[in-house]
Image: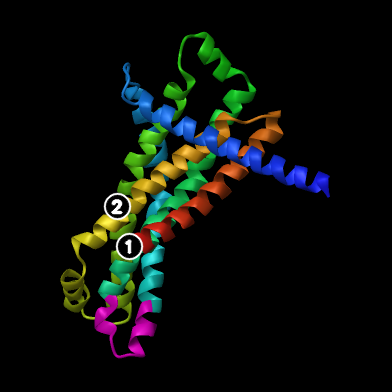
Amino acid sequence: MLGFIERIGRTVIEWLAGMGRMMTLLLTALLWAFVPPFRLQRLLRQIHFIGWRSLLVVVLTGVFSGMVLGLQGYYTLSRFGATAMLGPAVALSLIREIGPVLCALVVTGRAGSAIAAEIGIMRITDQIDALTVMALKPIKFLITPNILAGVITLPLLTAIVDVIGIYGGYLVGVQLLGVGQGVYFGEMQDILSMYDIKIGLYKSLSFGLIISWICSYKGFYTRFGAEGVSQAITEAVVMSSIWILICDYFWSSVL
């Protein structure tokens, strides 16, 4: 019985220590963002990696999400004789909830896993220690650009998902199912507000921070060789996805 309690206590202490390391890493990376010299070239490289190279999968996610919303929304609203509300239903669903969440999950799987793998391989091959020997701050050189790039690119990618998704719903609702084009966009203009757009913006900003922070942390503290890298990638993707959903619920309940 005492051994069981000891194992529980050890697990809790390790979890708290891990959370402390995560918060220390985040605060340190954010502080280094304001200290020169600024690594603008590496920041642009990470923006290109996270944003531009994720564009194709983000566009495909947006268009098919909008088409599915248009199809299912039409059949649902037709039961209540409210097909004229298809445009607002698609737009609100994408902008407030589906767009930010799907975009974040897709970027986690494509870019977040690569970030964890890159930093993890640098850790097990002693490249991070080499940066320290060269008088370069590893957190400033590796983590800070990732976090800034994630916060910058996620809102832009989410906006693309929203726009493409709305036109995906247009293709299904208007061109395929016969909803009036003026009705589709007219009702959307009347109901959609800037407040709804701000909610999606806040969510995408927080998701960008979560993805870049957690994936960088898991890679930075990788151990035990190639097996440790694979474990770090898995934990980074799973943990980021879970926290994205938790944060989404938090923002939805608060706002």
Q: Quadrant of residue 129?
A: top right
Disc ID at residue 210: none
* In the image, residue 207 lies in the stretch drawn in magenta: no
Q: Which residue is mark 2?
A: 201
Chief secondary structure of the magenta span?
A: helix
* In the image, residue 84 lies in the stretch drawn in magenta: yes
Q: Residue at x 37, y 56 (%)?
A: 100
* Amino acid residing under circle 1: Arg
Secondary element at image label 1: helix
Q: Assess disc 2: are there few (<14), some (14-19) or many (≥20) residues with their C-alpha within 10 Å of its C-alpha.
A: many
Image position of 92 (left or right of 213): left
Q: Assess disc 1: are there few (<14), some (14-19) or many (≥20) residues with their C-alpha within 10 Å of its C-alpha.
A: many
* Amino acid residing under circle 2: Leu
- Give percent across and percent down for residue 66: 36, 66
Q: Is residue 206 above or below residue 67?
A: above
- Quadrant assignment for the C terminus: bottom left
Q: Which residues are magenta?
A: 73-86
Image position of 251 (left or right of 105): left
- Give percent across and percent down for residue 25: 48, 30
> Is residue 115 visible to the viewer in this orientation of the structure?
no
Q: Is residue 173 above or below residue 62?
A: below
The tag earlier along the polypeptide, 1 or 2, is 1
Image position of 229 (left or right of 100): right
- Give percent across and percent down for residue 221: 59, 30
Q: Which residue is mark 1?
A: 96
Q: Estimate the spatial distance between the alpha carbons at disc 1 and disc 2, rounded to whole Å.
A: 9 Å
Q: Is residue 200 above or below residue 118?
A: below
Q: Residue at x 36, y 78 (%)?
A: 73
Q: Is residue 79 above or below residue 250?
A: below
66 and 136: which is toward the camera: 136
